[in-house]
Amino acid sequence: MKRLLVLAAAAVTAFAANAQTAFPGTKPITIVVPFSAGGPTDRVARDLAEAMRKPLGGVSILVDNAAGAGGTIGANKVAKATPDGHTVFLHHIGMATSPALYRKLPYSVENDFEFLGMVNEVPMTLIGRPTLPANNYKELSTWINANKGKINLGNAGLGAASHLCGLMFQNALGIDMTTVPYKGTAPAITDLIGGQIDLLCDQTTNTTSQIEGKKVKAFAVTTAKRLTTPALKDLPTLQESGLKGFDVSIWHGLYAPKGTPADVLAKLNTALKAALKDPEFIKKQEGLGAVVVTDKRVEPAEHKKFVLAEIAKWGPVIKAAGVYAD
Ligand code: ASP
């Protein structure tokens, strides 16, 4: 009897080991995106899902938009998800700014996630509603000064890239604007086009086609250097427009819940690296002003090192700005 039990236990262990190495099986993998569908983070996730599908043996990769609270709802969902490789998380710089912005974050960036590697770096653009009576940054600056106290600036909530960029913009001008939070910048840009808000600072992955189609007015890029993307190359930087030192570019990284088995993490990292070398993925990202990461931060340990350095970098900036949520 005892021998039978030992054999049964061995069989269960072998089954569990097999189940572990069977990843990816037929069950779909879900990339959680902490912002609304149709926005810039969602866009990167959908392109990445397509590029990672083949290296993961053709398994289905779905996107789950767990939007709200500047990305912290999605992050918390992943922090508490089953760590079996079927849930991964695409997030941007908000992963590093939220710990300073939220006094009670319900998860730990450092301890509740496995770091899978960095994905890309994305510049941002300052855009305005199409009816705004300004056609370049100089005219915008005159309009802002004449409309102090009446300007609405959209963002995707406290912790969003649009929030960070808007905060830095207001600080650089020394002017407070009324911020209007959305669940992502997809709905924010819809309202901008409709004239419900005046300004938005958003990733080029969301704004390039709107700028190209002249649906919004584009005033500047937020990076230190001008961009080379055809639709954006004529936009001045905010630095050359007079905002000394203004340089905001955001990045995306891929994560899994803490405790995801090491062999599964290795497979996900290999698939991510293959996706980052996929010419189709690179072309799509470059067409939207994003730069695919090729340096050592595609390795999990370097990715984690980078994010922890970003937390240390942004913490004091955010504290100095006196912005926080409970
Ligand atoms: N662009 C948004 C942000 O401000 C996120 C999104 O909607 O993807 O972070």
Image (cartoon, grey):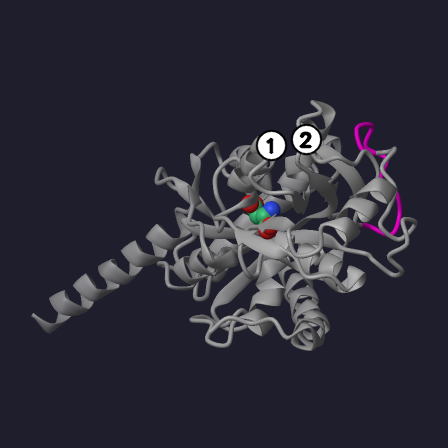
Residue 119 is left or right of residue 291, and the answer is: left
Residue 121 lies in the magenta stretch: no
- Viewer-proximal residue, 75 or 97? 97
Residue beneath the point at 73% across and 61% down:
175
Q: Is residue 225 magenta?
A: yes
The answer to whether residue 279 shows anywhere in this view is: no
Pick the residue in front: 233 or 23.
233
Vertical position of residue 274 compared to residue 216: above or below: below
Q: Mark 2 or mark 1, which is nearer the start of the sequence?
A: 2
Q: Is residue 57 left or right of residue 80?
A: right
Find residue 200 and report its horizontal and vertical position in percent. 65, 45
Horizontal and vertical percent position of residue 182: 50, 48
Q: Residue at x 48, y 51 (%)?
A: 34
Q: Given the image, on which type of amino acid does mark 2 rest?
A: Pro
Residue 183, numbered circle? none
Q: Residue at x 23, y 58 (%)?
A: 11
- How packed is label 2: few (under 14 Cα within 10 Å), some, or many (20 or more)? some
Magenta-colored segment: predominant secondary structure: loop
Q: Position of residue 155 (x, y in %)?
A: 58, 51
Tag 1's secondary structure? helix
Q: Nearer the viewer, residue 142 or 233?
A: 142
The disc at residue 193 is: 1
Disc 1 to disc 2, C-alpha distance = 6 Å
Q: Is residue 170 visible?
A: yes
Looking at the rendered structure, the kind of residue marked 1 is Ile
- In the image, is 213 to the left or to the right of 182? right
Q: Are marks 1 and 2 in contact (CB under 8 Å)?
A: yes
Which residues fall within the magenta stretch?
223-232
Q: Residues within 10 Å of mark 1 (few under 14, many from 20)?
A: many
Q: Identify the image quadrant of the N terminus.
A: bottom left
Residue projecting furthest to the left:
1
What residue is shown with label 2?
Answer: 130
